[in-house]
Amino acid sequence: MPRHLTENSPRTAPPEARRRQLIDATVTVISRHGIPGTTLTAVTREAGLSLGLVNFHFRNKDTLLAETLKFLAQEHRALWMRKTARTDLAPAEKLRAIIEAQFHPRICNRKKLAVWFAFFGDTTHRKSYRDISAGIDVERQEICAELCRAVIQEGGYHGICAEDVAATLEGLFDGLWLNILMYPDRFTRGAAHRRVLSYLALAFPRHGAWSAPAEAAQ
Amino acid sequence: MPRHLTENSPRTAPPEARRRQLIDATVTVISRHGIPGTTLTAVTREAGLSLGLVNFHFRNKDTLLAETLKFLAQEHRALWMRKTARTDLAPAEKLRAIIEAQFHPRICNRKKLAVWFAFFGDTTHRKSYRDISAGIDVERQEICAELCRAVIQEGGYHGICAEDVAATLEGLFDGLWLNILMYPDRFTRGAAHRRVLSYLALAFPRHGAWSAPAEAAQ
DNA sequence: GAATTGATTGAATAGACATTCAATGAGTGT
DNA sequence: ACACTCATTGAATGTCTATTCAATCAATTC
């Protein structure tokens, strides 16, 4: 019953397109039914493809899940990399860009958050998942620390440690994400964003421009 | 082959003891194999009991999982409730007690954290899990906000909102937990504890005694 | 000490799953 | 047209699970 009738889309497609199609379906299914509920039957049905295709384009289910996580990690990384790589921005502005990426609607929505925490919570494959996300997380934290160091020097701040601020930020990112996912009525994306900026305003009070961007909450 | 031979423990035991025994085994198994890997066979083997007992003492697997989460939530709550209920402690001290509970070795260890995030990540039952933990989370956050309000009044702080600090703390708690779970080499319990206190020192600078307790890291 | 109650056992059942694979289909080059 | 490659299909297979339940066992009551 797959696509045949729905579209003029060709029965066959380049592998890269199919892989992406399956990854998208996997994200959707994980967000709805969790990793245990993510059966290959459900994924292929969501994608409008047949069961056997997963084992053709990915070796097996574990690979599909790993590739899905990799995709999310890259998507997130690309968002802040664009700005932190520029040379014409001040450290504080780059820091703001990383925070904006963290709470960007394309990343920080209930669907994607559900998938992130599904991976975090899956003890069984924690090691392989960690290997995937660790590189990117470490990279971001080191860049944050670097930027904090620059801000501290600029502002002549004392009694505050760049690495500590970066680690605290990292904790705030993940924790606020979790709160948004678990209690969407009480925690919104916009409020979380503002709270991180408030923390930075506390840490670096002489860099006044930590105000939140004008955006509707949620 | 169960216990019969291992101990002089009687074959039969009061239901409450068996329930606790099964919950303990469930915590152990979830921490090792995640929720998908938590089969009744694995749980009963870990407990040294027979397969059918789970369906006798709990109605089914879902109930066992829900009761396990309830147990963890209560265990955590009891730890800070003891101190926040007292009338002879200053607000700042009570705030410290809540933070100490959050990073108490009995709560904040890799085994229990793995279980917490296994539940958080399980989309399928998120609603029932949330119903269990929401009450306790809301309660803690409201008490935190209340205490912050008292601290703000004591210290005459301006430009800082108690509810915001409480929400930021809540985020920090969860995020630092996740970091400890995922990257135990880079994030330790002690460092997390100190970071939360550093945040409070930033927010409430005139309450000087936010120093960390003397304890070895990890 | 028989009878009764409640706890415990594990084999049996039925359903769901990932993975395999033989068959089919569509493009591509000749 | 033809052969050939690659993508796609879905039925079949074997494994693993939760749940049921009849049988067994220990403790308690009468």
Image: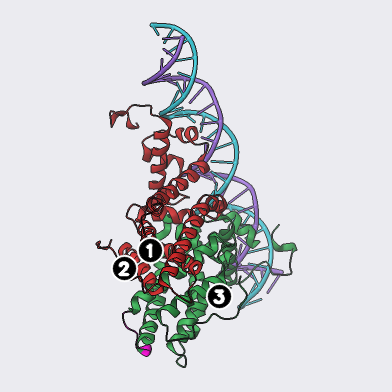
Chain colours: A green, B red, C cyan, D purple
Looking at the picture, tell me which residue is in the foreground, A45 or B154.
B154
Chain of residue at mark 3 = A
Alpha carbons under labels 3 and 1: distance apart: 35 Å
Examine the residues drawn in magenta and state their main secondary structure. loop
Residue type at mark 3: give it: His
Q: Is the N terminus of chain A in the top left, top right, bottom left or bottom right quadrant? A: bottom right
Q: Which residue is mark 1?
A: B92
Q: State the residue at coordinates (33%, 79%).
A: A160
Q: Is residue B181 above or below residue B30?
A: below
Q: Which mark is residue A104?
A: 3
Q: Which mark is residue B209?
A: 2
Marks 3, 1: nearer the viewer? 1
Where residue D22 sits: x, y (%)? 52, 21
Q: State the residue at coordinates (42%, 44%).
A: B26
User: Quick one: SS at disc 1?
Assistant: helix
Where residue A183 sits: x, y (%)? 55, 60
Q: Answer few, some or many: residues within 10 Å of disc 1's Cα (few below 14, many 20 plus, some between 14 and 19).
A: some
* Stretch in magenta: A154-159
Q: State the residue at coordinates (33%, 52%).
A: B106
The disc, 2 or 1, on the residue closer to the chain's N-terminal end is 1
Residues flagged by tags 3 and 1 on a common chain = no
Chain of residue at mark 2 = B
Q: Is residue A90 above or below residue A46?
A: below
Q: Quadrant of residue A121?
A: bottom left
Q: Is residue A201 above or below residue B113?
A: below
Q: Answer few, some or many: residues within 10 Å of disc 3's Cα (few below 14, many 20 plus, some between 14 and 19).
A: some
| Residue A63 seen by the camera | no
Alpha carbons under labels 2 and 1: distance apart: 9 Å
Residue type at mark 1: give it: Ala
| Residue A181 seen by the camera | yes
Where residue C30 sits: x, y (%)? 61, 78
